[in-house]
């Protein structure tokens, strides 16, 4: 394949998979939307090996997610038989019974002509593993973790075979761990495919992922988490750029995630840096919150103690509005605060939460990202290129990624 086109279902996932490909020596560019792609621009350079498109599609209805994918492929000039499509979704397979992972995979099969697409959500470095078709997180069945009560995509079934089978027009075929390690994957590709089958592959270690990655790196269609990209055959040294450290008062942390790990990270930051989270009050108007929180951020930045002010959503909603409306309101507040921060000279930003990351990048007018230094498995600093011509140093963190020291130690990576 001449080029890899990655269609990622959220923004943290896009930087995650882009980081993995950069470490294999491939030159990577990460677009923040299909609309941001402009191959006709005089600034466009076609000398990249991997084009990643961050699609805010995880919670979309299937038709809307497919339209985003279709637009991205058209804008990038996808060529069947020459370009590989890598459909990147979360390692916890975040998806409702109606989709949209299954419908999107069906669509991409039609686009590529690949009659036996692989399905590999496992990410061993972040303790996501699959055995006998069941997905585990830190040794627990997915349905027995916090993901069972996720507000957008509650995961109450751990069987990838059932989850995907309920969404897709295709049948699901399992390649068990023991068979993978005996070399059955390449043999399976050599056989005549089952009519309309997707191949769900077990993996519990990086050695398993490496076997799969080496076997699928030249196939027309790949789907899964970012771990596969990490183990594609290397073609050179890492292509990460250097994201620069700036002054302490140029820092801000915006938290849209309510995950268990993010709460631990906030608690650790509070106890070690003395910087408590400035919590959004969803009962106030957007304008009132922007004014109040903007003043608090300004005060915290002026103290110059080397800590970053944190603004985050409440763990429990306090407003009278419905959850979805409140979520949109909080997302709007965080996005407007990011713009206010950038216009006041702020240059370094950490965003926690996939949905929040997408909203903030779009509000800032980020066109594309270059991957910088690694912080934790699945999380890196990025150099963000804005429509205004300015740059920012941004880290996008999926809610459950990173250890409890993440908000404290991320900045030292820049130094």
Image: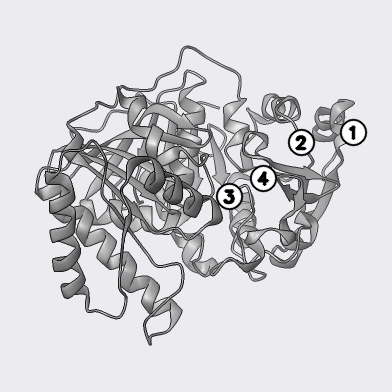
Vertically, is 76 above or below 230?
below
Mark 1 surroundings: few (<14), some (14-19) or many (≥20) residues within 10 A: few
Q: Disc 1 versus disc 2: distance between alpha carbons?
A: 13 Å
Q: Position of residue 34 (x, y in %)?
A: 36, 51
Pick the residue in front: 396 or 303. Answer: 303
Q: Are marks 4 and 1 in contact (CB under 8 Å)?
A: no
Mark 3 surroundings: few (<14), some (14-19) or many (≥20) residues within 10 A: many
Residue carrying label 4: 121
Q: Are marks 4 and 3 in contact (CB under 8 Å)?
A: yes
Pick the residue in front: 174 or 261. Answer: 261
Q: Earlier in the sequence, mark 3 or mark 1?
A: 3
Q: Disc 3 versus disc 1: distance between alpha carbons?
A: 25 Å
> Dividing the picture into quarters, in which one does residue 222 lie?
top right
Q: Earlier in the sequence, mark 4 or mark 3?
A: 3
Q: Earlier in the sequence, mark 1 or mark 2?
A: 1
Q: Are marks 4 and 2 in contact (CB under 8 Å)?
A: no
Residue carrying label 2: 204
Pick the residue in front: 334 or 386. Answer: 334
Q: Are marks 1 and 2 in contact (CB under 8 Å)?
A: no
In the drawing, does residue 23 fall left or right of residue 273? right
Mark 2 surroundings: few (<14), some (14-19) or many (≥20) residues within 10 A: some
Residue carrying label 1: 179
């Amino acid at each position: 394949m001449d080029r890899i086109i990655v269609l990622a279902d959220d923004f943290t996932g896009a930087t995650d998979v882009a980081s993995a490909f950069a470490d294999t020596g491939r030159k990577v560019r990460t677009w923040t939307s299909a609309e941001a792609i402009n191959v006709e621009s005089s600034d466009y350079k076609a000398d990249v090996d991997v084009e990643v498109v961050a699609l805010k599609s995880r919670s979309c209805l299937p038709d809307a997610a497919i339209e985003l994918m279709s637009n991205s492929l058209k804008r990038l000039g996808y060529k069947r038989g020459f370009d590989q499509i890598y459909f990147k979704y979360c390692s916890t397979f975040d998806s409702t019974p109606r989709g949209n992972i299954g419908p999107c995979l069906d669509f991409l099969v039609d686009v590529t002509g690949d009659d036996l697409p692989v399905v590999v959500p496992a990410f061993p470095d972040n303790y996501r593993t699959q055995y006998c078709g069941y997905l585990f997180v830190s040794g627990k069945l997915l349905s027995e973790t916090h993901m069972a009560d996720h507000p957008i995509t509650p995961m109450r079934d751990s069987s990838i075979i059932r989850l995907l089978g309920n969404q897709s027009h295709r049948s699901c075929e399992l390649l068990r761990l023991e068979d993978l390690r005996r070399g059955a994957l390449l043999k399976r590709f050599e056989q005549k495919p089952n009519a309309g089958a997707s191949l769900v592959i077990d993996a519990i270690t990086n050695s398993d992922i490496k076997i799969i990655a080496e076997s699928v790196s030249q196939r027309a269609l790949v789907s899964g988490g970012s771990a596969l990209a990490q183990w594609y055959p290397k073609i050179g040294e890492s292509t990460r750029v250097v994201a620069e450290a700036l002054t302490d008062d140029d820092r801000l942390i915006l938290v849209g995630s309510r995950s268990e790990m993010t709460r631990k990270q906030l608690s650790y930051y509070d106890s070690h840096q003395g910087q408590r989270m400035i919590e959004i009050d969803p009962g106030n108007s957007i304008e009132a919150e922007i004014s109040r929180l903007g003043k608090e951020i300004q005060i915290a930045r002026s103290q110059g103690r080397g800590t970053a002010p944190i603004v985050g959503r409440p763990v429990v909603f306090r407003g009278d509005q419905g959850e979805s409306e409140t979520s949109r309101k909080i997302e709007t507040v965080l996005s407007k605060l990011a713009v206010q921060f950038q216009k006041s000279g702020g240059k370094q930003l950490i965003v926690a939460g996939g949905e929040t990351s997408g909203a903030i990048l779009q509000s800032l007018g980020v066109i594309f990202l270059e991957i910088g230094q690694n912080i934790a498995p699945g999380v890196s600093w990025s150099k963000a290129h804005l429509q205004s011509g300015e740059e920012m140093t941004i880290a996008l963190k999926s809610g459950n990624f990173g250890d409890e020291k993440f908000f404290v130690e991320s900045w030292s990576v820049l130094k």
